[in-house]
Image (tube, helix red, strand yellow):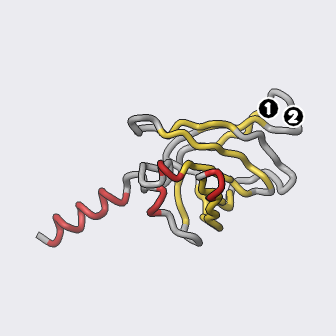
Amino acid sequence: MRLFIGLLLISFNLLASDWTDLEEKQKYILTQSFQLPQLERSGSFMEFTAGDEVVLSEIIGLDTINVVLFKFNYKKCPGPEMKTEMEIIPVKNTSPVVEVGAQLENCSLEIFIETKDLMRASFFE
């Protein structure tokens, strides 16, 4: 019975976490790939790949616009001067589809999510 419960808990941990489950200073893995357009190079994109590792550094409530900002240290950052435009990224396996704003600045992957969607699935495990 203990083995079954252990396997069940492990399988739940492999699924994407809700945004409210994410904690500062914890390591997370991207569960989906996406790209963001680079500011310095027109037509160039910064690739984020499922399996990339990040560490949640800060959660900031932006109450006046009903948004929460999640800042992640991006381990594969090509350099601190790298900046991207903000793009709207649909979170896979959400229905109705949850969309977040994403950008990279100073090796910080910044994810903006509406407060109404905080209890929905993120793209991190």
Real-space CA distance between mark 1 and mark 2, rounded to the nearest whole angstrom = 5 Å
- SS at mark 2 in the image: loop
When the figure is inspected, residue 13 is found, relative to residue 97, above or below; the finding is below
When the figure is inspected, residue 10 is found, relative to residue 89, above or below; the finding is below
- SS at mark 1 in the image: loop
Q: Splitting the image into 4 quarters, where does residue 46 fall?
A: top right
Q: Nearer the viewer, residue 7 or 100?
A: 100
- Tag 2 residue: 41
Image quarter where the N terminus lies is: bottom left
Q: How many marks?
A: 2
Q: Amino acid at mark 1?
A: Ser
Residue 114 at what x, y percent from top left?
55, 48
Q: Which labelled disc corresponds to residue 121?
A: none
Q: Nearer the viewer, residue 116 or 2?
A: 116
Residue at x 65% of width, y 55% of height: 64
Q: Amino acid at mark 2?
A: Arg
When the figure is inspected, residue 66 is found, relative to residue 59, above or below; the finding is above
Q: Nearer the viewer, residue 59 or 43?
A: 59
- Tag 1 residue: 44
Residue at x 68% of width, y 53% of height: 109
Specify whether 93 is left or right of 3: right
Specify whether 28 is left or right of 80: left
Residue 54 at what x, y percent from top left?
61, 59
Residue at x 52% of width, y 55% of height: 29
Tags 1 and 2 touching, CB below 8 Å: yes
Residue 71 at what x, y percent from top left?
66, 60
